[in-house]
């Protein structure tokens, strides 16, 4: 027998096609209040509305009976449908075709859905506990960590009491089989029968990226070990596949085309609290290929923001390689030893967090700096050991342009000759004849060749984009930009060059308008105009120096007379003029 199948992609498509306000409005009389809608709860009797629908989050919640969820959950609850039936119903309403699978696969999915339902019921239990008088100590603990009552509600935080079987008794009273609760990792068996797995802990419900409850993380309130306890592996929960908070942050990640990856629940919540909402947490586990593959669906850029201790740095190094392998552009936001994103956000605030993330390094720079930091490069032995590790790293770079660029950077940081380091890298690669590194000292005598223009480097597109976004919002700054000699050709990105021409000539067209609309729809730039423009000018300075070097390499062996020598003279004069400029 073949019956309805629903994949993650299908569920996303259905949820995107359906307006939760319209669906709920069929059964509940809603009235707008601010960004949300309120009405009388359809799940329990009340006279004062406590039922809220958020069109922005596509989520409903009742503060009276604690029921909540997305549009699929609402249809399941109000029409007594299974998850597959609710998805199918909504899909058919929107003309979305639903594929089919076998009865055996359907039974497996129904079992997974029962696990998600019992997790959601447990989340309601923990949520209620935190708001009871017995939860006062836990609420005080949250306040000390900067988690306000509203944040605790937004992330559905809860509390497990110290008693052995509080949740077990609650689930039985709700008609759930405790064997199912055990399969969900909520209870275990002992001498007393079924006992709660989580006791005396702050509870952080973990949802998959579709917003379905799949597990929990519990932080111990008192002394003892382990400090953090997660749900064990179940049919719906595997730490290697789930990223905490992605259900709340995925829309912002899409909008910014960038994710900030942290390690824990409180790191994520504290960043949310200061307005940084494109965040996901790896639940303190090693970053995996499944995590990278999932994030790749939502963005092309990632910033790793792990703790500043040795464990956090090791995790960052591993995460870099995994993300890079899946084609994401990776940067690393470093913290001092002993710091973590949670405490940093609470002490430095929104402005400090923006500045910290703005300083994130391209991951190759981070790797080079980290290798050097692990050795005493003031000694000959330390410098040799560090150079050996750097050569191994640089030889792994498949792009010749990237390898040359970071060889230059590594040599400068290590305090060795760029030519010597390049030679070591070439030997590592097994290249018989080592090409000389082109510098001002060895231009003479090198063979004449055509030098291809390198592509935009990591971060250059961002700098072009941020300057252009400021110009679109504040066109009066265009005069300042032109005064610094910036022309359309300075924008290597074709779309940005097109918009700059339109702005300069005040001639809007359809393409430029479309590009401008897309740029203006992004969140406001994190850095100030002064910082953005200064960074952009630094990029232009670097490009101009590089362009002159290319011209010099073409002319260096030419012996055709005075004209060539004069051109060489002019190029060298221009080169040194740019090189010595401090105004950038």
Image (tube, rainbow, N blue to C red):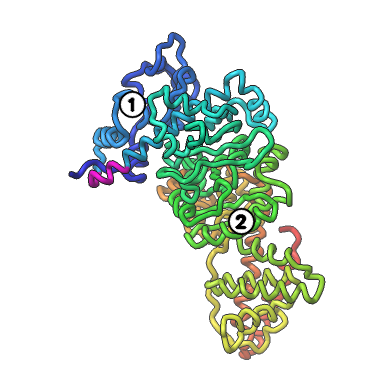
Quadrant containing the N terminus is top left
Q: CA distance from mark 1 to mark 2?
A: 43 Å
Q: Quadrant of residue 106?
A: top left
Query: Left or right: where does residue 140 sit relative to residue 505?
Result: right
Q: Quadrant of residue 23?
A: top left
Quadrant containing the C terminus is bottom right
Q: Which mark is residue 76?
A: none
- Kindly state the secondary structure of the residue where label 1 is placed: helix
* Residue stretch rendered in magenta on the structure: 99-108
Instruction: Kindly identify which residue carries mark 2.
Output: 316
Q: Is residue 76 above or below residue 475?
A: above
Instruction: Kindly identify which residue carries mark 1.
Output: 23
Mark 1 burial class by Cα count in 10 Å: few <14, some 14-19, many 20+: some
Relative image position of residue 425 (x, y in whole percent): 62, 79
Relative image position of residue 255 (x, y in whole percent): 48, 44
* Residue under the point 53% across and 23% down: 128
């Amino acid at each position: 027998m073949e019956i309805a199948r629903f994949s993650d992609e299908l569920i996303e498509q259905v949820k995107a096609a359906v307006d939760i306000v319209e669906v709920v409005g069929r059964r509940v009389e809603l009235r707008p209040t601010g960004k949300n809608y309120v009405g009388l709860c359809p799940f329990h009797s009340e006279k004062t509305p406590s039922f809220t629908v958020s069109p922005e989050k596509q989520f409903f919640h009742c503060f009276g009976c604690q029921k909540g969820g997305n549009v699929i959950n609402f249809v399941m609850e109000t029409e007594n449908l299974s998850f597959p039936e609710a998805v199918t119903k909504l899909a058919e309403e929107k003309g979305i075709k639903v594929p089919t699978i076998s009865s055996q696969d359907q039974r497996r999915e129904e079992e997974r859905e029962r696990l998600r339902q019992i997790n959601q019921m447990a989340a309601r239990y923990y949520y209620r506990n935190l708001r009871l008088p017995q939860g006062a100590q836990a609420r005080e603990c949250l306040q000390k960590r900067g988690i306000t009552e509203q944040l605790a509600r937004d992330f559905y935080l809860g509390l497990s009491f110290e008693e052995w079987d509080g949740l077990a008794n609650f689930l039985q009273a709700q008609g759930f089989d405790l064997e199912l609760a055990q399969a969900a990792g909520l209870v275990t068996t002992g001498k007393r029968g079924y006992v709660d797995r989580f006791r005396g802990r702050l509870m952080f419900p973990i949802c998959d990226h579709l917003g379905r409850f799949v597990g929990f993380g519990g932080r111990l309130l008192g002394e003892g070990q382990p400090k953090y306890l997660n749900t064990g592996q179940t049919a719906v929960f595997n730490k290697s596949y789930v990223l905490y908070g992605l259900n709340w942050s995925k829309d912002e990640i899409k909008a910014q085309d960038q994710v900030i990856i942290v390690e824990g629940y409180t790191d994520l919540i504290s960043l949310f609290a200061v307005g940084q909402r494109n965040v996901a947490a790896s639940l303190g586990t090693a970053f995996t290929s499944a995590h990278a593959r999932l994030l790749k669906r939502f963005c092309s850029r990632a910033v790793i923001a792990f703790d500043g201790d040795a464990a956090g740095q090791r995790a960052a190094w591993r995460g870099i390689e995994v993300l890079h392998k899946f084609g994401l552009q990776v940067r690393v936001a470093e913290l001092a030893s002993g710091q973590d994103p949670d405490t940093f956000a609470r002490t430095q605030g929104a402005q400090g967090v923006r500045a910290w993330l703005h300083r994130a390094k391209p991951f190759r720079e981070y790797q080079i700096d980290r290798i050097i930091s692990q050795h005493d490069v003031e000694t000959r032995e330390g410098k040799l050991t560090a150079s050996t590790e750097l050569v191994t790293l640089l030889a792994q770079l498949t792009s010749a342009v990237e390898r040359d660029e970071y060889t230059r950077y590594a040599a400068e940081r290590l305090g060795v000759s760029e030519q010597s380091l390049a030679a070591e890298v070439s030997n590592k690669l097994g290249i018989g004849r080592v090409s000389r590194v082109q510098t001002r000292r060895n231009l003479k005598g090198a063979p004449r060749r055509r030098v291809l223009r390198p592509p935009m480097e990591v971060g250059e597109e961002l700098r072009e984009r941020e300057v252009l976004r400021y110009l679109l919002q504040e066109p009066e700054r265009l005069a300042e930009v032109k005064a610094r000699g910036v022309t359309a050709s300075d924008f290597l990105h074709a779309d940005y060059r097109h918009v700059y021409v339109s702005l300069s000539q005040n001639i809007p067209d359809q393409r430029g308008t479309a590009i401008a609309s897309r740029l203006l729809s992004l969140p406001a730039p994190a850095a100030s105009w002064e910082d953005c423009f200064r960074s952009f000018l630094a990029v232009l300075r670097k490009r101009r120096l590089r362009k002159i070097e290319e011209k010099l390499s073409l002319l260096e062996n030419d012996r055709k007379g005075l004209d060539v020598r004069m051109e060489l003279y002019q190029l060298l004069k221009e080169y040194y003029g740019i090189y010595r400029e401090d105004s950038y």
